[in-house]
Amino acid sequence: MGKSASYRRLDLAEREEISRSLAAWRGIREIARDLGRSPSTISREINRAWMNRYTYRAARSQRRARRNAAKRRSGKLKLDANPKLWEYVREKILIRWSPGQIASRIRKDYPDNRVMRISAEAIYCYLQVMPRGELKKELLRALRQGRKKRRKKGQPAAHVRREMEAMVGIDERPPEVGTRQTPGHWEGDLLLGKNRQSALGSLVERKTRFLLLVRLKTRKAKEVRKAFGRAIKTYPAGVKRTLTYDQGREMAEHLKFTRQTKMQVYFAHPASPWERGTNENTNGLVRQYFPKGTDFSKVTASEIRKAQDQINGRPRRCLEYMTPAEVFQQEVLR
């Protein structure tokens, strides 16, 4: 049913009633009936601007509605009125920068140009109101992050300990590793592929968040040890000090790895992914490029390198919106 002449937009009182009803776990049709509105109107309201029934807030939705109304009255959105700004935003989204990263980094790239300013919320809003089409689909796909955590490996920790010689636990790791003041302390993991038959290695430097993605032929300990060693051997000793890993059997040759790289390996406690939080979070970024179910044996070296370079090229809030590549390079040159 189309809009009639008497159509009116939701007001603050209605939005507050929606918020209270959601908190009371009432259904959309029940809320719509009480307000004399269409269920589709209530559903669209709840799910606008990246909200859902758990995060919906009346005041926030009202502010968004007022901003959008003002933009409609002005006739042009900011990104429509500034092609150079839109090109910057579009280009960065397509290499998977987040709106927050874009909004903060643009201030560094254009420090004296007030016209080249935009908020993360404005970027989200613009994408929401874009006309449907391939460009909108492509941009929204680039924003998505798979946030489901990897399933832990199924072997009991005691079994893993018996297979690995002379493990050194994370409790014995030098205190300086936890401060992130000194470079050269890495975290490592494997991202498993389709049916757990293939894998991609990831190594992340804790201070700079610099990522190395390591192509693997197999998940066997010898292959992982050699591949990780090749990936890191070209870097100076100052950025190669320790590696923290989980108790996966692929690190069974950790003593040989230490002899090969001069990096001491420390093992996290079983089922404690937060002890390698930098690596776990970075793996979430990698999954944007290689979702669960990817067959890594069919992924080319150039595809892996492209993903690695784009992730290392994203500005990070924790780095004051420098990129991992920039900060790591500073450490290497010291």
Image: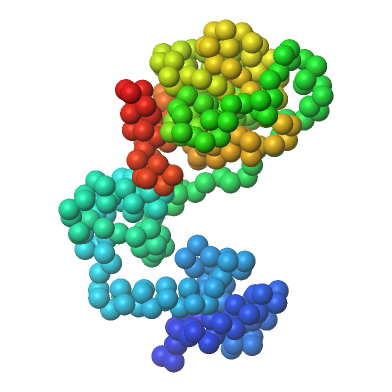
Q: Tally the numbered discs.
A: 0
Q: Residue furthest bottom?
A: 6
Q: Residue furthest front?
A: 175
Q: How far across and down, in percent of the image, does residue 247 sit?
A: 70, 25
Give me the residue at 28% from left, 67% from top.
77
Give me the residue at 17% from left, 53% from top.
112
Q: How far across and down, in percent of the image, does residue 47 sit?
A: 54, 67
The reply to whether residue 126 is in sight is no
For the rendered model, the colour scheme is rainbow
* Vertical comparison of 49 with 193: above or below: below
Q: Quadrant of residue 264?
A: top right
Question: Relative to 139, is 223 on the left or the right?
Answer: right
The reply to whether residue 270 is in sight is yes
Q: How far across and down, in percent of the image, does residue 28 sit?
A: 64, 76
Give me the residue at 51% from left, 26% from top.
185
Q: Quadrant of residue 256?
A: top right
Question: Relative to 278, is 320 on the left or the right?
Answer: left
Give me the residue at 56% from left, 45% from top.
146
Q: Quadrant of residue 31?
A: bottom right
Question: Relative to 217, is 129 on the left or the right?
Answer: left
Q: How far across and down, in percent of the image, does residue 56 sit?
A: 56, 70
* Vertical comparison of 250 with 288: above or below: above
Which quarter of the figure is the C terminus placed in?
top left
Question: Relative to 42, is 82 on the left or the right?
Answer: left
